[in-house]
Image (spheres, grey):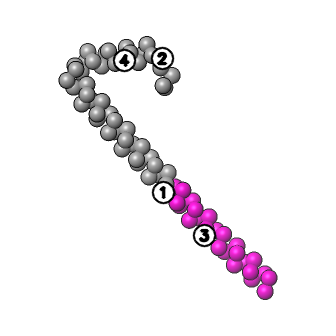
Amino acid sequence: MFGLGMMEITVILILALLVFGPKRLPEIGRGLGQGLKEFRKVGSEFSKGIMDESERLEDNTQKPQDTKESDQTK
């Protein structure tokens, strides 16, 4: 996980417990989880928007070519 071993993760969790205390640690974890969820949601919406725009541009560039080809065959 992110290049961290089990020992490093354990040390980080123990330090977080000492710094924030057992009462605030669940709140902080919940906040981090919600932040990551929102970040993923925004990222997927951004990716979807890029893909939709790319498909729209491809459709627009193919239509004039189709018209030119049909004009040449007439």
- Residue at the right extreme, as displayed: 73
Which quadrant of the structure image shows residue 8? top left
Bounds of the magenta segment: 50-74
Mark closer to the chain start, 1 or 4: 4
Check disc 1 and report the residue beneath it: 49
As drawn, 34 above or below 61: above
Which quadrant of the structure image shows residue 61? bottom right
Could you say whether the residue bearing mark 3 is in a helix, strand or loop?
helix
As drawn, 19 above or below 44: above
What is the quadrant of the C terminus in the image? Answer: bottom right
Residue at 60%, 70% (x, y): give it. Answer: 60
- Which of these two is toward me, 22 or 65? 22
Could you say whether the residue bearing mark 1 is in a helix, strand or loop?
helix
Asked if labels 3 and 1 touch by Cβ distance under 8 angstroms, the answer is: no
Q: Name which residue type carries label 4.
A: Ile
The CA distance from mark 3 to mark 4 is 52 Å
The CA distance from mark 4 to mark 2 is 11 Å
Asked if labels 4 and 1 touch by Cβ distance under 8 angstroms, the answer is: no
Mark closer to the chain start, 2 or 1: 2
Q: Name which residue type carries label 3.
A: Asn
Place of residue 71 in the rendered image (x, y in percent of width and height, measured from the top left): 74, 83
The CA distance from mark 2 to mark 3 is 50 Å
Check disc 4 and report the residue beneath it: 12
As drawn, 61 above or below 26: below
Place of residue 55 in the rendered image (x, y in percent of width and height, measured from the top left): 58, 62
Could you say whether the residue bearing mark 4 is in a helix, strand or loop?
helix
Q: Which mark is drawn over residue 5? A: 2
Check disc 3 and report the residue beneath it: 60
Q: For the residue carrying disc 1, how many other residues have a C-alpha within 10 Å: few (<14), some (14-19), or many (20+)?
A: few
